[in-house]
Amino acid sequence: MNRRRCMYCNAEVRAVRKGEHIIPESLGGALSIRNVCSQCNNEFSVIDKELVSKTPLGIVAGQELGASTDGLWDYNAEHDLALEARIVKELDAPVLWPQVVFDDRGPMFWFDLAEGRQVGEERCMREFLELVTRARNTLRGGYKRPRWLWTPVTHPPRRGRFPPRVFTPHSYRQWSNRVHFICRYLKPIDQNRILWSLDNWRPFEGRVKLKECWGSIDPEAQISYRPRYILRALVKIGINSLAHICKQTRVDQQAFPEAIQFVRYDRGDGPSFDDCGFVRNEDVQTLDCPNDAHALRLTHGANWGLDCAFFGGRIGATVSFPGPNHDKWQRAEIVAPIGRRDWQVRTSRVVLPRTMRVEWGDICRIAPSLPVKNVEHRFRLERRPGN
Ligand SMILES: [Zn+2]
């Protein structure tokens, strides 16, 4: 029997449960390949997560697929606080999730200003407190699935203090007895502090200073991610796509050693930040990506090049990596419908020059359809392992 080997590490591939998604599942990628072992698959979740939940692409994905975005915070200058926020399609700034922040002075409610005004601030707070208390009680045992999730944060935003907080990723309209709460904190010791503060908090006894607990009027957000993780995740999309569509070219660690070492371990120089990364949106438009799909273009010249248009071209990226080509085409145009497996692949021998201009900092140029003005785009420095 012909045993299947992992294309990334050459280990024998045993039972494959989900396969490795060519385009990450949280971007709506549905097509997967089977010759990746579960260990590699698990290890890749770190770079995938960085790409799909911490970058401008993550914000677009959050809007398109209705998921919440990690690493998106609202900044409140008056209190110098980073707050949990989301970006909604219709508005021109991030919107706060309803939350309690356990600041040194005691717990504080934060709501989105508009949402709170609609409902009435006191009612909003009372209902929130009732729900958060219920969710807290699901930690007390007897509940198989507590509606309270502990989420330690290893990389807080650079701007603003980051005291522990508990929030619900649901707007007021969606509140019910079943909503869950996420508690983000920096140190394990915070867990007890939060529970203690919550259990001993009596916000409606005595004088209630509602205005102090209000939403942010001029929100800012910041995005922070590690650029090399992004390039690794992009190279992986390229290698996965090749494994799916190449007939003659073997795609494994013998044939693509540098690219695969880069994806797995961040080894080698990797692609250059000058011509790989997120790109100017007008260049993405040249890929003619249909609205409900992603479009990929693979080209082979001196290296492999991968140009991507995600979510109908709302945002795009480009990356290159070394590797052979024994197939009879130099260019493949792929349309990958979101949430579906029926990829359309057209190959041709004509190579077009790659023309995408890379843009790392300016979110308005990368994703002009995003209704954000105050977003601060930051890169996290990362320590590279020895080469
Ligand atoms: Zn493997």
Image (spheres, grey):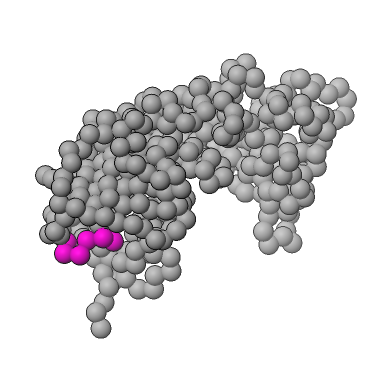
* Residue ID at (16%, 64%): 248
Position of the C terminus by quadrant: top left
* Residue 248 among magenta residues: yes
Residue found farthest to the top: 78
The total number of labels drawn is 0
Question: x%, y% of residue 349?
Answer: 15, 51
Part of the protein shown in magenta: 243-249
* Residue 344 among magenta residues: no
Residue found farthest to the bottom: 1
Q: Is residue 261 visible?
A: no
- Residue in the foreground of this view, choosing between 34 and 76: 34
Question: x%, y% of residue 143?
Answer: 72, 60
Position of the N terminus by quadrant: bottom left
* Residue ID at (38%, 26%): 365
- Give the answer, above or below, for where 12 lies relative to 330: below
- Residue in the foreground of this view, choosing between 361 and 227: 361
Question: x%, y% of residue 188?
Answer: 57, 43
Image check: 280 left or right of 223?
A: left
- The answer to which image quadrant residue 198 occupies is top right
Image check: 61 left or right of 36?
A: right
- Residue in the foreground of this view, choosing between 113 and 213: 113
* Residue ID at (44%, 44%): 291
Image check: 70 left or right of 385?
A: right
Residue found farthest to the right: 206
- Give the answer, above or below, for where 94 lies relative to 230: above
Q: Is residue 175 visible?
A: yes
Question: x%, y% of residue 222?
Answer: 49, 27
* Residue ID at (76%, 38%): 128
